[in-house]
Image: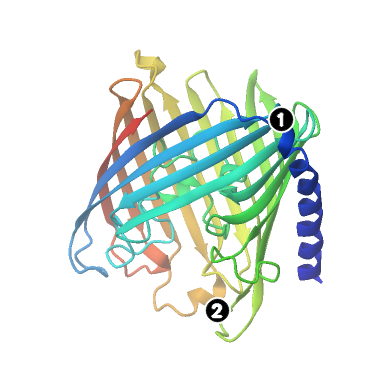
């Protein structure tokens, strides 16, 4: 039943998109806008000699992004995001963690890819449709102070909610409707696998409501979402099982002063499939205007991945994974910033036998 529901969703989005192409002969491309950046990260572990790596290590990664966009007619935008990189950073063979310590690193030593390629159309003053290869995390579970690994937190669990099984960037569609100036509703479909095979049966679906709320004269963002992944998953107790994954969550950011914004995330996912069934985080971003450096930022956050019962039963000494991160982003000028970063990983992957590890690093960022 659920898979048939996704077929209907895909069909509706497709037929909404088809009329857009009928105007292609009349549309004119606007001026090409170019942006991007280079990010370099070096991280060293301390206290890791008794864990999986057997020693403390120092690893690095570098990535470069090139973003091209152009208006198409009066209501459309075409966008292309190219990414190249080298270095895996600190991966699971060096430090295990549900939370991750370097979200900017790639999965391989060297990669070149088209990260995004989509067309966006303003269907009305309040409705926008995006179709193509998209990054759903750019639209869902977003956060003002905890959402960008190139400028804010480095750990994956603070860049986004680790209790969402977002697919790798793939073919998809996103529709957002602004009910009012304070309320947005968004829905999206995407292929659950980046190889684009069997995209109907293996689909990812997410729906989110965003509300802007004024607290003490400061407008904050409050987001609530539900997601569903129809691809087959083994359960924690049966590797041959073919279950679908699901979860719910929220992402909040709220300014409390002109310089300080606090944030919180909470996610709950299927305890039969995933090793942790809940993840939460909270923290703050502090703008440097308080000490006369408007472009500097201090960030600090703490979070936990709470173990599922079935996964906990597979461990001799289970313990919920905890993660702390703090950084200072020092802006040298409007294009260059250097960010010292400190992370502490406790009970990595739910194993209390895992020694507490300190990860000290530095990130360099050039943007244009």
Residue 160, image x, y percentages: 51, 48
Instruction: Write the residue at 33% across / 38% down.
Output: 38
Q: Secondary structure at mark 1?
A: loop
Q: CA distance from mark 2 to mark 1?
A: 47 Å
Q: Secondary structure at mark 2?
A: loop
Using the rendered image of the protein, determine whether residue 51 is visible from the camera's viewpoint: yes
Mark 1 — residue? 75
Question: Closest to the observer: 213 or 187?
Answer: 187
335 left or right of 202 in image: left
Residue 104, image x, y percentages: 38, 48
Query: Can you say whether 262 is above or below 118 in the image?
Result: above
How many numbered circles does the render carry? 2
- Badge 2 crowding class, 10 Å Cα cut-off, few under 14, some 14 to 19, many 20 or more, is some
Instruction: Write the residue at 49% across / 40% down.
Output: 147
Residue found at the very far top of the displayed protein:
292
Question: Closest to the observer: 284 or 339?
Answer: 339
132 left or right of 124 in image: left
Give the label, 2 or 1, closer to the camera: 1
Residue 109, image x, y percentages: 29, 59
Mark 2 — residue? 236
């Amino acid at each position: 039943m659920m898979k048939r529901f996704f077929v209907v969703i895909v069909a509706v989005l497709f037929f909404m998109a088809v009329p857009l192409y009928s105007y292609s002969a009349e549309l004119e491309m606007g001026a090409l806008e170019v942006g991007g950046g280079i990010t370099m990260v070096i991280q060293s572990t301390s206290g890791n000699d008794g864990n999986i790596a057997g020693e403390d290590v120092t690893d690095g990664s570098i990535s470069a992004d090139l973003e091209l966009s152009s208006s198409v007619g009066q209501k459309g935008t075409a966008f292309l995001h190219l990414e190249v990189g080298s270095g895996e950073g600190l991966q699971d063979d060096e430090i295990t963690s549900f939370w991750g310590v370097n979200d900017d690193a790639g999965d391989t030593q060297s990669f070149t890819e088209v990260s995004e390629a989509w067309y966006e159309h303003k269907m009305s003053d309040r409705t926008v449709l995006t179709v193509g290869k998209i990054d759903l995390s750019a639209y869902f579970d977003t956060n003002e102070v905890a959402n960008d690994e190139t400028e804010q937190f480095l750990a994956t669990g603070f860049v986004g909610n680790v209790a969402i099984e977002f697919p790798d960037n793939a073919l998809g569609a996103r529709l957002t409707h602004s009910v009012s100036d304070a309320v947005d509703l968004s829905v999206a479909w995407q292929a659950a696998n980046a190889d684009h095979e069997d995209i109907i049966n293996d689909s990812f679906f997410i729906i989110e409501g965003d509300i802007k709320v004024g607290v003490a004269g400061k407008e904050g963002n409050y987001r609530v979402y539900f997601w569903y992944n129809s691809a087959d998953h083994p359960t924690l107790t049966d590797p041959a099982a073919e279950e679908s994954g699901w979860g719910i969550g929220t992402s909040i950011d709220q300014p409390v002063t002109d310089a300080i914004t606090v944030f919180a995330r909470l996610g709950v996912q299927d305890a039969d499939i995933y090793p942790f069934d809940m993840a939460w985080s909270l923290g703050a971003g502090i703008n440097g205007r308080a000490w006369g450096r408007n472009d500097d930022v201090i960030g600090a956050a703490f979070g936990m991945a709470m173990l599922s019962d079935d996964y906990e039963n597979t461990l001799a000494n289970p313990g919920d994974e905890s993660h702390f991160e703090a950084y200072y982003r020092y802006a040298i000028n409007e294009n260059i910033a250097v960010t010292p970063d400190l992370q502490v990983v406790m009970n990595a992957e739910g194993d209390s036998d895992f020694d507490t590890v300190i990860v000290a690093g530095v990130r360099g960022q050039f943007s244009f």
